[in-house]
Amino acid sequence: MSCMSDKTGKLITDDGSRLDGRRADEIRPMKIEIGVLSRADGSCYLEWGRNKVLVGVFGPREAHPRRMQRADTAVIRYKYNMASFSVEDRARPGPSRRSIEISKVSREAFEPVIMAELFPKTAIDIFVEVLQADAGTRTAAINASSIALADAGIPMKGLITSCAFGKVDGQIVLDLNKEEDNSGEADFPVAMTQDGEITLLQMDGHLTSEEIKKGLELVRKGCKEILEIQQAVLRRKFETPIEEPAKETSMEEISDIENKVVEAEVSMGYASEAKVVEEIHEEVKFFEEDILVKIAEEETVTEDIQEFEELKNKIEEPESLVEEKTLKEIIVAEIEEKADLKASLEINPKITEFEELELIEEEYFSSDAEKMTFESEEFAEDKTPLYEQSINEEVTSEKTFESKNELEFKDKSRKKVHAEEAVKVEEKYEKENSKGPWRVVKDPSESGSKGDKDE
Ligand code: UDP
């Protein structure tokens, strides 16, 4: 059909159908969504035919810049913008004469209904973005703005609806689409209140008064349809369902409810919430048992410690006795040992040998007394023990079995005695203690070179 129309250049067929199949008094299908922008106070997305517009309303809010504020009323600002991608040929971004004009006439279309006086010094901002354009974008934007204003809670005397009529192929038709707008003879957008008061009226083209009269009748019809759609949308959004009043409950019903509550309580064990509570109870019970076990273990340990202490004491008592006994035994043994030592000294055959050696020594001294005088220090020291032992008899006897080195060390620390004097002392000593078997002389075999000489 459209191909045929294109070929003939007609926009309306002989049977009165338009290119998109509508009749002359029909509007394009309209779809409205409300509250689509979360940051806006009110918003609306509207599709009308192939037009797609998005409207956001902000306010009433403090007007900026301040010079724009009005003391007696709110300032209504309307900004229409056509996205560059909204049309076939790219639209120039930013404001244009057309967009400024559309913004102005659209704002004025709302001023009669918005109760701006309630919000002095404030601003009510309406932002329109045309996402897709197919003629009639200003009327689509006005219809969407009306919904967005209502969504924002802006007090209004009523909704504004808008629709255009035009002249296509000599016929007055409602709501022109893009092809009809481009090839048509006139375009006549109108906006009106719910009461039918016109708030916007524009004309592009040539129309007779009869055509305008006929066209306005079509617009009223169209706006009425649009209003119904708008109201339906708003009702769906804001209308709250009426709750039925609660009827009085009889005693039988109360007892039934009580029984159900009891049943529900019984079956709580199987409810998810009850299961959680039960799990918590079980967990607490487990912890309690665990704590009891730990306490019992600690008590056992304490008991064990006490038992251990007792056992330890029991062990230590005899040990201490044993120690004491052993100590005594050691002392006694030592005493006995000393006594034995003394006895052994008395009968030690070594002493006899010493005496024999002593005689040899004396013989040596007497024959070589002069030489002895100039003997080495070592020799003199060798003689010293005899001399010393004559002085410290007891000590010497005790030290008889001390090591050779020990004796030598002690001897070296003592004063040297002249050999001659030593001989004299020795003689004297012999006279006085000739019987003394305990006399100690140094073993000649230990005298080193001297021993060799003796040989
Ligand atoms: N249009 C366009 N480029 C423009 C302006 C408009 O393609 O810069 C198209 C667009 O589809 C628009 C139509 O021309 O819907 C009619 O524009 P008009 O100025 O009549 O405004 P409207 O009918 O959209 O309110």
Image (cartoon, helix red, strand yellow):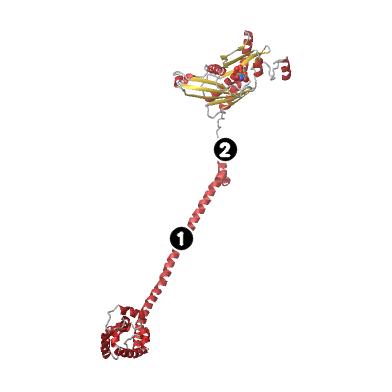
- Identity of the residue drawn at 33% across and 80% down: 408
User: Which residue in the protein does label 1 denote?
Assistant: 298
Secondary structure, mark 2, is helix
Residue situated in front as seen by the camera: 49 or 367:
367
| N-terminal label among 1 and 2 | 2
Q: Quadrant of the N terminus?
A: top right
Residue situated in front as seen by the camera: 452 or 67:
452
Q: Quadrant of the C terminus?
A: bottom left
Q: Which mark is residue 452?
A: none
- Identity of the residue drawn at 63% across and 8% down: 208
Residue 435 percent across, percent down from the top left = 29, 91
Residue situated in front as seen by the camera: 449 or 320:
449
Residue situated in front as seen by the camera: 414 or 211:
414
Residue 360 percent across, percent down from the top left = 33, 90
Q: Is residue 136 in view from this perspective?
A: no
Q: Quadrant of residue 38?
A: top right
User: Which residue in the protein does label 2 denote?
Assistant: 253
Q: Quadrant of residue 121?
A: top left
Residues at circles 1 and 2 in contact by the CB criterion of under 8 Å:
no
- Distance Cα–Cα, label 1 vs label 2: 59 Å
- Identity of the residue drawn at 32% across and 83% down: 379
Q: Quadrant of residue 443?
A: bottom left
Extreme residue in the top direction:
209
Residue 227 percent across, percent down from the top left = 59, 20
